[in-house]
Image (spheres, helix red, strand yellow):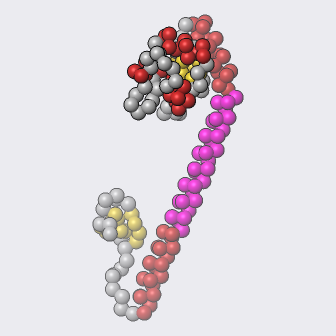
Amino acid sequence: MSEYKIIDHKVVDESTGEILGDVVTDGVITDKYAFEAVSEKLSRIESEIDSETRRLEAMIENQRKLLARKKSYRDYLLAVYTEPLKAYCLDQSEKYGLSTIRNLYATYSFRNVKGGLKLVDEEAALESVSKFRGLKLKECIKVTQKFQVSKLTEAQKQLIIKKGVPGFAVSEDEKRFYIKTAGSGNGNDNA
């Protein structure tokens, strides 16, 4: 039960300072009418609490739907505008030697991502490299059976690329495009 105090014939919650309602004249029930009046008042308050709780839950659900709709529309806008934004920013980047372009609403940046041998199917890669004899790949395999491309020598990488070993793919060097709007907490990787 909340702690409360009476100020100017109003019940005030001490912890929040909010006015809760009117002061009742007394806390005594002497007859059937008073009994019914208090019961009715409690019933109305309970009904209001239930009604407002349902209304709040409906509002929260509607807000979730609105938020999902906004996210979906944002995804649509990114699908439509990422490439044109990227082209514009790339043009500006090349003209002025910038890697980051800003305006009042967003930050657009490019980051160089090194291409090379990438692990795409760990199981297939582990199975495939276990068949190679004499490549000394044991130091590339953790006890947890995770393949570490970073531990391969350049010769080992080239052999895997040449043989087209399952579980690996070759990527090209690329410049990734990132958008961070003023309204977002995180940048979106739209590469």
Q: Residue at image x 52%, y 14%?
A: 157
Secondary structure mostly taken by the magenta-highlighted segment of the chain = helix
Q: Is residue 133 magenta?
A: no
- Magenta segment boundaries in residue numbering: 51-80
| Image spot of residue 83 (x, y percent) | 67, 22
Above or below residue 63? Residue 125 is above
Residue extending farthest bottom: 31
Q: Residue at image x 44%, y 20%?
A: 137
For the N terminus, the image quarter is bottom left
Along the line of sight, which residue is nearer the eye, 190 or 141? 141
Q: Residue at image x 29%, y 66%?
A: 3
Along the line of sight, which residue is nearer the eye, 26 or 103? 103
Please give left or right for residue 45 compared with residue 191 in the image.
left
Q: Quadrant of residue 159?
A: top right
| Image spot of residue 38 (x, y percent) | 42, 82
Q: Residue at image x 57%, y 19%?
A: 176
Above or below residue 136? Residue 181 is below
Residue extending farthest front: 133
Q: Is residue 57 visible?
A: yes
Please give left or right for residue 84 compared with residue 17 in the image.
right
Above or below residue 116? Residue 121 is below
Q: Quadrant of residue 29?
A: bottom left
| Image spot of residue 115 (x, y percent) | 55, 15
Q: Is residue 109 visible?
A: no
Residue extending farthest right: 80
Along the line of sight, which residue is nearer the eye, 13 or 76? 76
| Image spot of residue 180 (x, y percent) | 53, 27
Q: Is residue 73 magenta?
A: yes
